[in-house]
Structures are given as structure tokens and as C-alpha cells.
Amino acid sequence: MTAVAVVGSQWGDEGKGKNTDFLSKDASFAVRSNGGNNAGHTIDIDGQEFKMRLIPSGIFAAGKGAVIGNGVVINPEVMFGELANLEKSGIDTSKLRISNRAHIILPYHILQDKYQEEAKGDKKIGTTQNGIGPCYMDKASRIGIRVCDLLEKDTFEEKLRANLKVKNELFTKVYGKPALKFEDIFDQYYEYGQKMKKYVTDTSVLINDALDHNEKVLFEGAQGTMLDIDEGTYPYVTSSNTISGGICSGIGMGANRLNTVIGVCKAYTTRVGEGPFPTELLDEVGDRIRETAHEYGTVTGRPRRVGWFDSVALRHAKRVSGINGLSLNLLDVFSGFDTIKIATAYELDGKKIDYYPASLKELYRCKPVYEELPAWNEDITQVKNYEDLPENAKKFLHRVSELVGVPLVTVSVGPDREQTIVLKNPWEL
Ligand code: IMP
């Protein structure tokens, strides 16, 4: 198949960077189409660790280029910082391509994110405070500044002046904060635009052409299904569509272009920020998983909330994204555990349910119905073939796949590229 998407099927941080890096070596292009530098992908290549937030993980291996699509929101300062880091390590970044329609995160978006969160008090979303939500707000309000606007001096000037007027009213009158000055932003961002120019193109044309010529394209989802603005645990979500449908609008291609959707999950669940989390573990088992798996945010360093594997969430993800292959990461974390739990359904007000309630009040009342499976003692970090895994690990994987109703394609037993067991090649699904 030529168009393969990798999407998060939990609350983000499922280890998608490793999956996309693994798959991109066979791809011509690797594409990001939603979110911004709220994402954090850690990739280990030959013992060297790279932390990617905005640039597609496929920059390391995709043959013809890494693409930032129109659905992404770009913080230029972060982007150039990441590019400089990659170049320092000898990575060729010349094949980066940026959509002329992507929106730019400006300093006022970051401040607005912070002020909004402060004003919400204990009702805060727990955002990454990178200005993601306010940038998408401006896009939907039709006052956003796109890459193509940044490249035209007069357009940028006109839009920035108009936006600052509105933002400064908001900052000074609603939040009681200082106003921003036009001069402090304009020159620096115009320069960013000029520096960006060489990468800018119509990425929809680029990717549709590649697919027309049967080239392999890998789509890298950011965040996860449960953080999707429509299908996640609203309002405790991010501000973009993280499901597979968001890929089509985020690059500009038809829904029928996508052949395969790989849903990535962990052997357990994590969540950063606020919001409901039915299988959350607030005990020493949760602490043990967090410490064993180093569950601390790539972007914020925040300790992640940890819980058991939730098959209700995974079935929801399967339905809304059309997942037809499952990649499970961090199986090695359970070596040495006595048992592992999997939520098979929820109990809501005494009734067993098999769906994700839209109402947060209902969701907070949901109690997971668990199935308990025996774990294993063996260190599995060097296992290369599925057959060589301990019997109990295979039973766990089989049950996960059965409950989700999707075949497993890869299982990860460690952070390195090589520590991946391939059951089916996603490019051949
Ligand atoms: P925002 O995307 O910064 O607006 O944050 C909204 C919510 O999404 C918060 O709960 C964040 O912790 C969460 N979030 C955003 N990006 C990621 C990610 O890449 N991994 C995990 N959580 C994320």
C-alpha cells in the first residue's frame, strides 16, 4: 500500500515517533498534518536520542522529504531550533517541505494560552502552553496568519496590526496584562518567513503527485484519538483533529487516498494534563509503571498519569479512525509484574456499557470492568520474533488484539529501532 497513516489511539505519547521512524525508511515522504510543537517524539537512532516536536520524524529516513502540511500550526522559532539541532548531528534537513497554507504561531498565541489557563483556575485544560489552541482559534475565526501571508511583507504587516489591536484589548482589558508592541514582533517574524521561504510549497500538490506515481507516503499523526477535538474527551483535548480524517484535511487529499491506518498504543495507558481517565492508577502500581517506563513528558517534563490498558478507548479509536493494524509499544515494561489488567468494558450506574460517553459527568462515573492476566519474569528486550516471547506475553497480546478487533502489526520491546517485533509489514496490509 502506498499511503499509510500512523495515529495515536490513546491520549498521545504512545511512542508513535518510533513507529514512524521505523516505517519511514521505506517511504518517499513523511508527512505531519495536525498539531504543532505540543507533540513530542523521542527517537533513538544508534544510541543517539532525538527529541522532535514539530519536524516530522521521517526527516531521518524518508527518501524524498519530510512535509509539514497545511493542518499544522508552526512556531518558527521552535522549527529553526529543531533544524539547527538536527544539522549539528549531521542530519540532512534540505528536504523539509512546508505548506504555504499552514498557520503561524505568534507570540500572542503563547501568551493567550497561558492567560486562558490561568483564568480557568482549577478548570484548566493543562495545555502545553505552546499557543496551539489560540492559533487554531484564530484560524477558525479567519484572522490567522498563514505561511504565505508571512512571506508577503504588506499582507503580514496588515494582518499583524489588525490582530494586535484585538489581542491587546483582550490582554489589557480582560486579563490585566501588558500590551504587545508591533515592532517587537514584525521584523523578527518577517525574517523567519524569509528564512522559511526555501522550504515552502503547495504540499497538497506534492503529496497527491507522489501518490499518483505510486510512491509510498507515511502520515505521522500527532497526539491521540482521545485528545481529538471532536472525538476525544472534550473539552480536555487538543485543538485539532488527531484522528485519521484530520490527515486528509491537514494535507489536502481525498479520504479514499488513505489505504492503511495503524493505531499505536502502549501496553498500558498514559495521559498528560487534566481530564477523565477511567483506568488511571493512583497507587504504587501506577508509580512502578511510571518509573520503569520513564513516563515524563517530552515537551513539558510533567509526570504522566498512568493506568491500565483500556480496550473501550481502543475500540472507540478503531471506529473513528478506521484502524486496521495495531502497533503496541512498551510491552517490556511488564517484565517482573505478577499480573496485568485490561479494561474490557465500563460500568455506568450499575449497567455494563461498551462505548465512550460524551458527557464528562457520565465518564467520571464510569468504572472499568477488568480482566486480569498473568505477566512474565523474563527480560524480553532482546526478543526479535513473536514466537520467542514468553507464553504469557503472547496471551496478553492476543487478548488485546481480540478485544480491539484489530490484528497486531508490530510490538515494541525497547526504545531502539531494532527492538521491534514485526508481525505484519504495514506497507503490505
Ligand atoms: P494543547 O495541545 O497544548 O492545547 O494541550 C491540550 C491537551 O492536550 C493537554 O491535556 C495536553 O497535555 C495534551 N497534549 C497535547 N499534545 C500532546 C502530546 O503530544 N502528547 C500528550 N498529550 C498532549
Image (cartoon, helix red, strand yellow):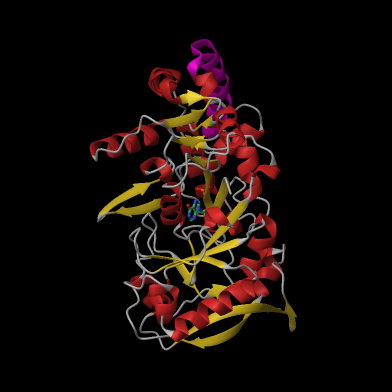
Task: Give above or below for 315 relative to 425.
Answer: below
16 vs 248, left or right, is left
Tell me residue 326's x, y (percent): 56, 64
Q: Image point 40% across, 31% down: which residue?
A: 95
Foreground residue among 191 and 372: 372
Number of residue marks: 0
- Can residue 11 be seen? yes
Q: Image point 52% across, 17% down: which residue?
A: 156
Task: Give above or below for 300 relative to 380.
Answer: above
Task: Give above or below for 318 relative to 332.
Answer: above
Tell me residue 89's x, y (percent): 24, 40
94 vs 120, left or right, is left
**Magenta span: helix, strand or loop, mainly?**
helix
- Can residue 349 be seen? no
Tell me residue 312's x, y (percent): 65, 71
Question: Which image quadrant is residue 159 in?
Answer: top right
Which stretch is magenta?
A: 151-171
Question: Which image quadrant is residue 286 in?
Answer: bottom left
Which quarter of the figure is the C terminus placed in? bottom right
Q: Image point 53% across, 18% down: which residue?
A: 161
Q: Image point 29% across, 34% down: which residue?
A: 84
Foreground residue among 269 and 203: 203
Foreground residue among 205 and 185: 205
Residue 273 inside the magenta-drawn segment: no
Tell me residue 375's x, y (percent): 44, 85
Foreground residue among 98 and 216: 216
